[in-house]
Amino acid sequence: MNSSPRIYLPILCLVLLPFIAHLPDLLGLLIEDPAYRTAGPGVRGISWLLFGTPGWVDPNAGATTEALGHEAALQWLSGHIPWWNTYTGLGMPLAAEMQNSALFLPFILLLALPHGVILIKAALQVLTGLCAFGLGKSMKLSLPACIFMGILCEFSGTFAWFGHGPIMPLPFLPLLVWGGFNVANAVENKKRGGWLLVTLAIAGSILAGFPETAYMNGLLALAIITWRVFQSPRFYRKAIIFRIFYGGILGLCLSAPAWLSFALSLPVSLVGMNADFGNAHFLSGSTALHFFPYLFGPPLFGAEQGRMDLVELWWHTGGYIDLGLLTLAALAFTIPSTSYSSLRYVLGAWLILTAMKAEGVHFVSKIIDLIPLIRQTMFFVYASPGWWFALTLLAAITIDSYSHTKTSKKSSIFLMGGIIFSAALLSLLYARHALALQQHLPHANLLNYASILWGFFILLLIIFVAISTKKKDVVLSSIGITNAVLLFCVPVLCGSRNAKIDYPALDWLKRETAFTRVVSFGTLPPNYGAYYGIKSINYTYLPVPRVFAETLDANIDPNIDPSGFYTPGLGQKYSNASSIHDMNLYLSASSPNTLSSLHWLSQHSVGLVAVSPEKNIWQDILLTHPVAGNAQAYDFTAGPLSGHIPAPRNKGATVSKVGLAVGTFSGRATGKINVTLCSKGVCQSGTTSVDQTPDNTVIFIPLDQKLAITGPEDLSWSISTDGNDIKPAVWVWQNKENGELSPMMPLQTEFDPPDYVKLSYQDPYITIWKLSNAAPYFSADNCHLTIHSTEKLEADCENKDTLIRQEIAYPGWHVTVNGVHTKTGATKDGLFQTANLVSGHNTITFSYSPPKGVLMLFLFIVGLLGTGIGFYRSRPISLH
């Protein structure tokens, strides 16, 4: 019988299945695109079949993969290498950010198309499945086992729950292992080559742009390939290692533009909190979530229902495992002997040790942390793709063994099933606190029971088939495939329907931001300026240019996380309840108020302010600063408390809320707190109940009517309590100068926009203000400028002058003035680019290319030539 149909029909199935799974999106029935959930303004009319996110638990699926990846794709299609992103922050390196996969050709080009996020996901699923199928054929597994392995790798838990960077390197784990097996097979059969797949796998893993996943997958591949090397006769091992090493070096050369640009960006960048994750591990419900994927509903179900304390549970997982796959994998250990008996123990050891690390078992964690860079990696998240692959490989060995009529003792099967059943029950016991958090959510119990029953049903069904059914390989693979595909498709049902975006407002912003930037308050998410072609100072980036992050920290928000500038702090975050333990921080430094922050932004080429309709930015939280000393709790046994505080200085300000740091004695205090605030004899009062108020928090008490501030004189205040039981206390500090007890009393003030702020655009979904005092993108005091684009202009100068370009000064920028090419300079604060102009006419062009570009090109050409020569000299690798 001709074997070709037996090969090509499964391959056709592997190609079509992922696209079929995403048909609701591709046909426009249920939209999985993150833009329709996160990328306002005017994201409206949304409805869905299930609550949750459609296949992404991390908003970086939108902010990084979709927004930045789309910009990279457009640059490729316009004939430019996507080195730089002028639309985000004050300009940011694009390819060096790595996580956006800017150099991941040809896949990145899919992001230029409608449904781009889904197309690239489906394409990666297909490639993963084909590589896994090829690996199975190289291992000489049975056809059912190869088909099973291909489809299971296509529908992994990571593909199901992640739509951004972590999925990009997934195809290259099976490809790398396949390459290792092919090298060993070629050497043993005295054939040349076999290493080409290793080259493609290494290059692809790095160009894919998510080093954490690539690194974790590489460690697992190294373990498997090492096992394969030691399965070969001793006299073949050196040749196998040499060819794998040779292929790996060529892969590094081919991917040099990605890893070298990233490495060169680190000395001038901040990497946020990615410093030490050595002690980080699963939360109490994480293990149960891996066994029962929808125990807490579809991805971020709780968050969609307003239960934000469940978000961390999802963010502590990189996918799921599922009891069905775990059971099929465990059955591999019940088969007396196979050609891969020892590989079972390598994979088993990997799974157990890495699971113990993720669970936080101290002595195992410390040993694994000795591996370089592991402490800097969120191991408990990015180990998940490796777990799925290792379990799938074990399950394929199980199916292959049953294809050759190898059977297991029923006692062994029952024992293994009992172990897994017990582990699953134990995980549910540890998840009881997390389960209790979501009990008030709609349909929570139904979701809990349905997920648990499905998981145990699949487990028992597989055990039953393993002990009683003929043709176990076909039946077990069918059960495993059906289970995996069904679990994968649950998030797809969370897709949006009838969603619309306010494109007229976005088009207006695009036109108006040709030479200025916009700052967004809750309407244009970070990085989406790059998606829509709008220059926006809001960003989420890693690594982020150090000078930019530190400048924002000094001038906008002293407590900013450098990885993101979502909206300026402007003091407004203090309107939320905050721990008393942060009081010293609040006393020592507060955010600049709204007006000073807007003034700073306007001097850094921010000329527009975009606000969502429900937000009021014309307010401040102004903090009073009692003389620092030891805090004490005033319990009102001595009667009401009173004193004076400085008046807010904003012109025409009114006070709407008064904040107090209260103690409620572990939440046992009852009654009310009364506050009165007076300005020039005019007083307003407010009252709030402290029942169920957390201990040692800042609460804001609304005044019955807003208090107008009519002069610079101090405000007077008084505080009292009502209640017969346990009264609340107020945290105060004693003024050493006059002995007066002073609370930290933040005031929420409201005021009219200043004269230089003008309303420029408004519709039901967005309000846009223009700052008339915004600094120009280009400036030179003694020159007349004719601006053609952000990179080209002409200047006619009376004398020598310095041109300031409000794009961040970053290594790699050059300027050509009248044909003379040189590096750009920097302003005194190191933030913006400068260029020296001569008297008379100047033709000026700015350009960017990463440092060490010649070295990158040289390494890439070496890799390309080495791969081409090796491919020419090697025989083709066949699947037959």
Image: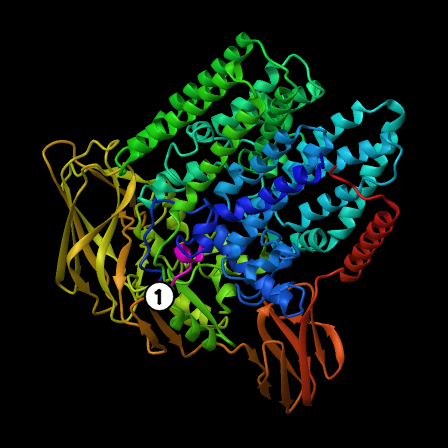
808 relative to 398, above or below: below
Give how far across and how far down residue 269 sits, in percent. Answer: 61, 54
Q: Residue at x 54, y 62 (%)?
A: 113
Magenta stretch in the rendered image:
34-42
Mark 1 element type: strand
Give how far across and how far down residue 286 sits, in percent. Answer: 45, 30
Give how far across and how far down residue 201 sits, in percent. Answer: 71, 43
Q: Nearer the viewer, residue 297 or 610?
A: 297
527 within the magenta span: no
The structure's colour scheme is rainbow
Rendering quarter of residue 399: top right
- Position of residue 181 in the picture relative to residue 363 (left or right): right
35 within the magenta span: yes
- Position of residue 876 in the picture relative to residue 479 (left or right): right
Q: Residue at x 57, y 79 (%)?
A: 778
The residue pinned by badge 1 equals 611
Q: Confirm whether residue 519 shows in the render.
A: yes
Dot 1 amino acid type: Val
Rendering quarter of residue 847: bottom right
Q: How many marks?
A: 1
Q: Confirm whether residue 373 shows in the render.
A: no
Rendering quarter of residue 242: top right
129 relative to 619, above or below: above
Location of the N terminus by quadrant is top right
404 relative to 860, above or below: above
- Residue farthest toward the front in the current orientation of the protein: 1
Q: Nearer the viewer, residue 128 or 8?
A: 8
Give how far across and how far down residue 418 sits, in percent. Answer: 47, 13
Q: Nearer the viewer, residue 506 or 380?
A: 506
Query: Badge 1: how crowded within 10 Å, few (<14), some, or many (20+)?
Result: many
